[in-house]
Image (spheres, rainbow, N blue to C red):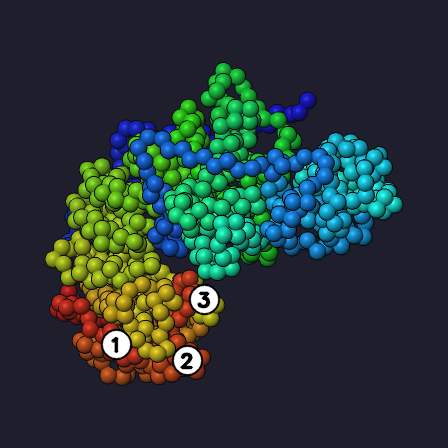
Amino acid sequence: MDAQAQPRVHVQGRPGQEKPAAPAAEQAGAAEAEAQPAEQPAAPAAPPAPEDRPDSPDLLYRLGGARQAEAGERRLYADSVGGDQVAGSKHVHYHRADEAAGYRPGRVSPDELRALDEVYVGGPVHDEAGAELARRRVLLLQGAPRTGRKAAALRLLDAACGRQVFRLDPGTDLARFPEEATAPGGYLLTEPVTRASDPLRAARIAVLGERLAAHGSHLVIVLDPQAAVTGIRPLAWRPADAGRVLRAHLRRALIAALREPDGGDAERLLDLPQTGELLAGRHGPAELRDFAALLVGHLDGEVAADLLDDFVASSAAGRVAEVLDDPARELRDKAFLLALAVFEGASYQQVTAESDALTLVLRQAEDPEHHLGLTRFDRARSRLLELVHAVEERSFHENDWGRVPTSSVSFRDPGAGFQALRHLWQEHPAAREPVADWLHGLARSDAVLHRVRAAVAAGLLTSVDFYSGFGTFVEPWASSSGLRLRQLAAWALQVASEAGLLPLVQRMLRDWSGDEDVALRWTAARAYATFGVDHPDSALQDLERIVRDASREQLMDVVLDTLGALVLGGRPGPVLAALVRWSQDPSPELREACHRAFLQAAGGWDDGDGESDPWPRLLRIALRTGAAAGSAGSATAGETGQTGEPSERAETAAAVRTLWRTALGSAPFGAAAAEALAGWIAGAEQRHGLVPALAAFLPSLVLTERDRARLDHLLRQVARTGGLSAAALAELRAALAGPAAGPGTAGSPHPSYAGSAHLGTAYAPGPSTGAGRPGPHRPGADATPYPGTTPAPPAVPGEPRDTERTRG
């Protein structure tokens, strides 16, 4: 008897529904902050416990699976789930011929073979298969169903034996073949019954080949991935390129419709977005044939575009429905499908472990009075993957110790994971509660991947049924006392907004940012770290409202983190412009938030690219004046990673300089600003091109001789502590010796920056993604500081501060 396995179960209960008190980590320091003089940095709140520190917002796009990775790249979800909403139920049925439906023992008709000739496209191993069949007379062709392996076998036999091709019954006794065959020719045996105790052995295949040669015949045996074979390796079938197969079927369909097969009609149909989406799903030949017929109908005006969309969606939806709706299907198989929908892209072992945990939760819901376990060694990997129409891809992962082999499992259809979750949530309401319990357990897991995937699944389910998803996941997490759970609510709202609920999520965050519940305000502020990248105006308006609130100190840390994420995100311009405005606001709370957020962002470094070392992210932004001026060697916005017109990029770069000047001249923050700037300078010569970049940037901070003296003092101080060599110090001090920038100029670039041979005309840094480098520095291109700003001299530790010229 098989041993009973007890995999871990994530179910640990749901968050409480009552409104919790704010965590102590958030309440600490509020009273002390009120007692401090205006603009003094508030005492930092006690950090949350290590086990409840919120996860970094960008993990949503790094660990959320292929769907979220694509959304992170585009930051605009084009494949909106909400685009086809109808009242009531909507059912679209497509009846596709099963691969086995056309299998009949006996002779294959010449008409069928001729029709195959018109559409057949050989796969990567077709020639190798033909050579082996000719040499051995018998070919073992092994592959997954719906990949064209039977069509390939027929085509190979037709080429070898003319039109004399026969199908054999799967129960054919190979020990008595081909003596019992009626005539010489080519024979196809599909998926014969094999067992571990009675496999296809190499000796039997060799004898069979000799008898076939004597008989003047050929035999192709098509095997499934689980077939038992000993002593001989079957040829692994690899399907032909789906685009070529679709083109072949489309050509035949156009001819049947009396249209020109090689004209512009075919190209227009192949360029349709629905065609591209279908081909991304790695569909089988039968589905490609049916889709080609629909395309021709669309060309004739008989098939609307939404029916093409439905066909693409039904390819995945129909397959998941077959698994989830079949009462005879094992519960464990259904759990595997759902676990893969949540953990797509993870390893097979991890998906299996999570599916076993979900199986136990579902079984407990069905029969809570009995202790139910799971048997070991009862499922083959290849059978499971084929059941859910998934593939396992092997690759290598680079870590600190070298390359490690790894693998990942994903659906063949890109949208199958969402279709599985949607079908479960809409068609099987009784399964909602146990699946929700499983997701809540994942949300409380110590593994960050579990938490991210739980949030993504919750967001998708919320987009399917808002009230159910919001009440089950989003609201309990958002109002929780745990910061990690609030982060999950923020992620879920981001996913829901990308899946079609954008206006609703935007209004919700607006309401939450002014709610009396501190937990909801925290969640709204955190959500803007991702949501605000595409909607900066809404984010900045609500964050400003939170900062002005009397209880701001309970939320200041999350506001600063969000502002930092937005500054270092894809569109820093609007955020930096808002910080400049905050720096001039009469409110000491806004000015403090401005300085703290800017200095926090100033500590952020990017990853560099293939040609440049990591640099301070704000320095890259500040040196984009060459691109803003539109020089011939400048990079585009896409290359720099910063969107917007050249004037917007120039204003963004000017904002960085303005904020540096203001921070350096601030009485409570000047020392911290000088320390942050010293962090850019120290060790700069160890980073490719950083010293020339600083030589171009530092003069833009000089408005007076006193400014120059203080920056010179800072350089010498860094050199005294070993952060700069004498040569680098001399280069930076020489750059400072030029004319002061004045209120309307950006400062003159250092010669080594503007004309360095190793930088060329496309110098200066690219974005954190390493997408390219902007153009050369051009003096005065973005020099105008923001109106009303009165920059003060940099404050340098060890020197007196000129407080009379200090603004806020």
**Which disc number belongs to residue 609?**
3
Q: Nearer the viewer, residue 100 or 251?
A: 251
The percent position of residue 723, horizontal first and vertical second, equals 40, 71
The numbered mark, 1 or 3, whose residue comes first in the sequence reads: 3
Q: Which residue in the structure is indicated by mark 1?
A: 781
Residue 394 seen from this side: no
Tell me where residue 140 sits by quadrant: top right
Q: Secondary structure at mark 3?
A: loop
Q: Which residue in the structure is indicated by mark 2?
A: 760
State if disc 3 and disc 1 touch (CB < 8 Å): no
**Total label count?**
3
The numbered mark, 2 or 1, whose residue comes first in the sequence reads: 2
Q: CA distance from mark 2 to mark 1?
A: 19 Å
Instruction: Give, as a three-letter code, the residue at label 2.
Output: Gly
Q: Residue furthest top?
A: 369
In percent of the image, x 19 and y 71: which residue is there?
785
Q: Secondary structure at mark 2?
A: helix
The percent position of residue 673, horizontal first and vertical second, equals 27, 64
In percent of the image, x 42 and y 53: which residue is there?
272
Q: CA distance from mark 2 to mark 3?
A: 17 Å
Q: Residue furthest front?
A: 258
Instruction: Give, as a three-letter code, the residue at label 1.
Output: Ala
The numbered mark, 2 or 3, whose residue comes first in the sequence reads: 3
Q: CA distance from mark 1 to mark 3?
A: 25 Å
**Which disc number belongs to residue 312?**
none
Tell me where residue 102 sits by quadrant: top right
10 Å crowding of disc 3: few (<14), some (14-19), many (20+) = some
10 Å crowding of disc 2: few (<14), some (14-19), many (20+) = some
Instruction: Give, as a three-letter code, the residue at label 3.
Output: Asp
